[in-house]
Amino acid sequence: MSMFLEGNLGCVKCSDKHGTCVDRIPLFDFLSHEEKKIILEKSIHRFYKKGELIFSPGEAGNSLYIINSGEVKIFKLSPSGKEQILHILSSGDFLGEHSLFSSDTLKNSAQAMKNTALCVLKGEDIKSLILQYPEMGLKFLEKYSKKNIETLNLVESIGLYDVEQRLAKYLLDQMEESGSPHITLSMSKGTLASLIGTSQETLSRRLSYLQDCEVIRLQGQRSISILNVESLEQILSR
């Protein structure tokens, strides 16, 4: 039976040789088998096909969505329809947390970038779990803080840097994170363009220019080798 089905089912019924979805989510790593079972009984498993919206602005924010498998983008649309990606989230990440502790409706949109399985917990259940297991609250805050820092860095980057500088910063950040000058993009160039606040055509021109200047080497659709780190640093600091 295919994993990606129409409709929802309780997470307690969804398991494989690697265990249940709760076993694969770092937020619950420290819990005992019995405690994980409690979470399974309270959660719902939802499946979204590639391109399907998970939520939109104006909807009630009363649930926490935890990614079991797949990939999700969080984004905003301008009045003219231009998309700005805020986050790309994958297995173990969560979304929908902003409205858990307030009465505000959701401000952003979330869309599955590939077939995606989510564990969904009601806001009141998450609050009860955090009160019962403070370590979960600390892990929750750690991930939440990281996402906020990423958003602040994105706003700063778009406000202070031009497109070439934003691209240079992204490449340098990816190199630092991977520990290698050879980068494999985890997203399409169209998605990357939206993430750094430009068009796909402009991104392609900037990448080609950097390759012509022997700063990078493009290999296929998603592989980039950084040949001259100093040149990227100079672009960023100009």
Image: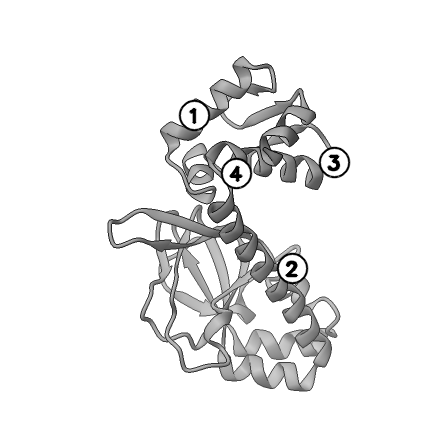
- Sequence-wise, which precedes: disc 2 or disc 4? 2
Closer to the camera in the image, 36 or 62: 62
Q: Amino acid at mark 1?
A: Ser
Q: Which mark is residue 24?
A: 2
| Residue at the limit of the structure toward the front, as seen here | 238
Tag 1 residue: 204
Q: What type is the residue that disc 4 sits on?
A: Arg
Cα separation, mark 3 vs mark 1, equals 25 Å
The amino acid beneath tag 3 is Gly
Residue 118, placed above or below residue 73 = below
- Viewer-proximal residue, 32 or 1? 32
For this orientation, the residue located farthest to the left is 80
Q: Residue at x 68, y 86 (%)?
A: 132
* Disc 2: CA contacts within 10 A as few (<14), some (14-19) or many (>=20): some
Give the residue at mark 3. 179
Q: Where does label 4 land, which residue?
A: 166
State the CA–CA distance, disc 4 to disc 1.
Answer: 14 Å
